Image: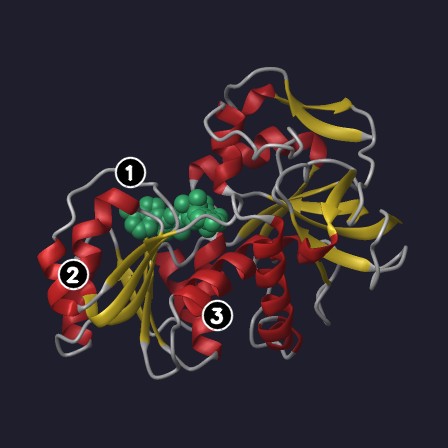
Amino acid sequence: MRAVTAAQPGGPEVLTVTEVPDPVPGPGELLVEVAAAGLNRADLLQRQGFYPPPPGASEIIGMECSGTVAALGDGVDGWKIGDEVCALLAGGGYAEKVAVPAGQVMPVPDGVDLVSAAALPEVACTVWSNVFMIGALQPSEALLVHGGAGGIGTMAIQLAHALGSRVFTTAGTPEKRAFCAELGADVVIDYHEEDFVEVVADQTGGRGVDVILDNMGAKYLARNVTALATEGRLVVIGLQGGTKAELDLNALLRKRAAVIATNLRGRPVEGKAAICRSVVENVWPLVAAGDVRAVVHDVLPLERAADAHRLMESGDHSGKILLSTAG
Ligand SMILES: NC(=O)c1ccc[n+]([C@@H]2O[C@H](COP(=O)([O-])OP(=O)(O)OC[C@H]3O[C@@H](n4cnc5c(N)ncnc54)[C@H](OP(=O)(O)O)[C@@H]3O)[C@@H](O)[C@H]2O)c1
């Protein structure tokens, strides 16, 4: 099969399409003929040699895909050859075929085309697990999601809005801020010019927000804790602003608040399967009803994986960037 490989770690230019052996589905796995793969920020780190795949996972980059079931490993039931699916992967997505544990495979939600479905697994599983399963956001509560126009942000705004929460978000350009408002954000903050802590305090009468989904890590830690309401939950999923910062435990203690940091890729297969089941049960109906949609910025052929990485590095995108195997 054709797959995007990197002869050595480096810039986007190391990504080229080569012929590699087809993967073989093991017991409990499906072989998926890939229609499209979604890009994730972690892919950029993996290409640079900083984020190796978990033990046993494919060395090929790519943490999500959509496609058609092409073969079933031993002991798989509930799926048949030809089913249209999307899947959360530990690796291997930038290729024409990928083997994936059956529990990480989800049906394509009604109303979504097969290519666009590749935009859903990572953002739906990450947002659903962190904001709703771990952060336990309630309809009466307020969410702050940083980077609202990114892949994760566009899903977090839509889901929280659809489920009745008040949504605060940050974004870097006027176009992105307008897009966040269109998706359902109630308060959109310019992270270059405004202090999100002040805006949150103004807009909530000093109460703060109940859940924060954070992509910045160290850079925003202290300010995020200040912006939390009593019994608030700060869930850190990205470290774009560094890994180490001082945490004022007294501030946390006085609010009876929590700081949680999580990672989807490193979870065991059963943990990912539980998240996928919950996503199919809770998120897919909202997608089918048109309340939540896959936000696709661009679809490029596999051969242009390097350009796709350059686009993500530029930060000029809103929503997801996909690679299509169709050429
Ligand atoms: N832990 C996990 O399991 C997990 C899973 C998936 C993703 N993630 C992480 O989640 C984050 C978002 O991923 P993604 O796929 O959505 O990437 P993405 O589409 O490239 O989005 C990155 C976002 O970062 C925002 N940003 C940059 N500087 C910022 C700042 N100073 N303040 C606020 N926002 C800022 C950008 O906002 P503008 O475009 O407006 O500048 C953009 O929305 C990444 O850090 C990724 O690694 C973690």
Q: Secondary structure at mark 2?
A: helix
Left or right side of 296 for 159? left
Q: What type is the residue that disc 3 sits on? A: Gln
Q: Give the label, 1 or 3, closer to the camera.
A: 1
Circle 1 is placed at which residue position?
243
Residue at x 38% of width, y 73% of height: 137
Viewer-side label of 2, 1: 2
Q: Residue at x 39, y 64 (%)?
A: 178
Q: Nearer the viewer, residue 275 or 167?
A: 275
- Say whether residue 316 is visible: no
* Residue at image mark 3: 158
| Quadrant assignment for the N terminus | top right
Q: Is mark 1 within 8 Å of ligand 1?
A: no
Residue, disc 2? 252
Residue at the limit of the structure toward the top, as seen here: 8
- In the displayed structure image, the side of residue 83 where residue 267 appears, left or right: left
At mark 1, the secondary structure is loop
Q: Secondary structure at mark 3?
A: helix
| Badge 2 amino acid | Leu
In the rendering, which numbered label is found on residue 262?
A: none
Image quadrant where one finds the C terminus: top right
Closer to the chain start, of discs 3 and 2, is: 3
Mark 1 closeness class: few <14, some 14–19, many ≥20 residues within 10 Å: few
Pinpoint residue 23: horizontal percent, then vertical percent: 80, 34
Q: CA distance from mark 2 to mark 1?
A: 19 Å
Of callouts 1 and 3, the N-terminal one: 3
Report crowding for label 3: few under 14, some 14 to 19, many 20 or more residues within 10 A (C-alpha): many
Quarter assignment of residue 314: top left
